[in-house]
Image (cartoon, rainbow, N blue to C red):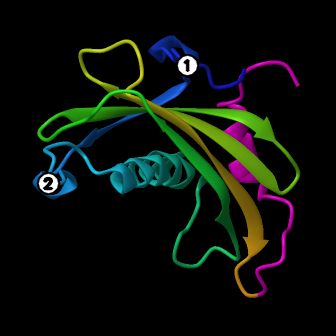
């Protein structure tokens, strides 16, 4: 599956509710664009910690951001709760491409969509390595589409 213009909830496998905060709004009264990336990071890392056993403080192998993109469709505002949908579009040996949809509680169509690429590296060298088996297993559960 590739990101489409009219992404809907049913195309995502995992969801995380993320309350917006007063400080997320900008002077124009909506969530600032950089905060959308924070929501992406939050849903991904919460999943890796809870489902993949990632120890963010001491794991010898960590994921680092290699690429990201966000398409803004509709504004988000405080005090909405964002429901971040997550799926895996590509799972390589040492990298993964996540696709994310940000939804409000009352909408079936995404307010924003995007992707985020992690490359797994040794923490001490920053050299790419195969992702840990527990993380790979967790990410397999999020895979969509044909490979």
Residue at image point 42% right, 52% down: 42
Where in the figure is residue 116, as x and y percent of width and height? 62, 48
Q: Which residue is mark 2?
A: 27
Q: Quadrant of the N terminus?
A: top right
Q: Quadrant of residue 142?
A: top right
Given contact means CB atoms under 8 Å apart, are the residues at marks 2 and 1 in contact?
A: no
| Image mark for residue 139 | none
Foreground pick, 97 / 60: 97
In which quadrant is the C terminus drawn? top right
Start-end of magenta stretch: 125-147
Q: Which residue is mark 1?
A: 5
Residue in the picture at 71% in, 29% down: 143
Element carrying mark 2? loop
Residue 7: image location, x then y, percent: 52, 18
Position of 1 compared to 3: left or right? right
Q: Give left or right: position of 18 versus 64.
A: left
Crowding around mark 2 (Cα neighbors within 10 Å: few <14, some 14 to 19, many 20+) is few
Give the camera-side residue of 36 and 90. Answer: 36
Tell me the crowding category of disc 1: few under 14, some 14 to 19, or many 20 or more residues within 10 angstroms, Cα based.
few
* For residue 104, above or below residue 32: above
Magenta stretch: helix, strand or loop mostly: loop
Residue 32 at x, y percent in the picture: 28, 51
Q: Quarter of the image holding residue 121?
A: bottom right
Q: Which percent across, then down, holds residue 85? A: 47, 30
Q: CA distance from mark 2 to mark 1?
A: 27 Å
Task: Give the answer, above or below, for where 99 lies relative to 50.
Answer: above
Out of 18 and 38, give the one closest to the viewer.
Answer: 38
């Amino acid at each position: 599956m590739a990101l489409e213009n009219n992404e809907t909830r049913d195309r995502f496998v995992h969801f995380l509710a993320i309350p917006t905060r007063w400080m997320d709004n900008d002077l124009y009264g909506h969530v600032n664009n950089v905060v959308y990336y924070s929501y992406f990071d939050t849903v991904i890392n919460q999943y890796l910690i809870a489902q993949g056993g990632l120890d963010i403080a001491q794991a010898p192998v960590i994921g680092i951001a290699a690429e990201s993109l966000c398409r803004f469709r509709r504004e988000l505002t405080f005090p909405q709760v964002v429901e971040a949908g997550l799926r895996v579009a590509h799972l390589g040996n040492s990298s993964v491409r996540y696709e994310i949809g940000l939804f409000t509680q009352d909408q079936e169509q995404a307010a924003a969509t995007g992707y985020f690429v992690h490359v797994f590296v040794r923490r001490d060298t920053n050299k790419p390595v195969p992702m840990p088996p527990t993380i790979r297993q967790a990410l397999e559960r999020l895979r969509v589409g044909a490979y």
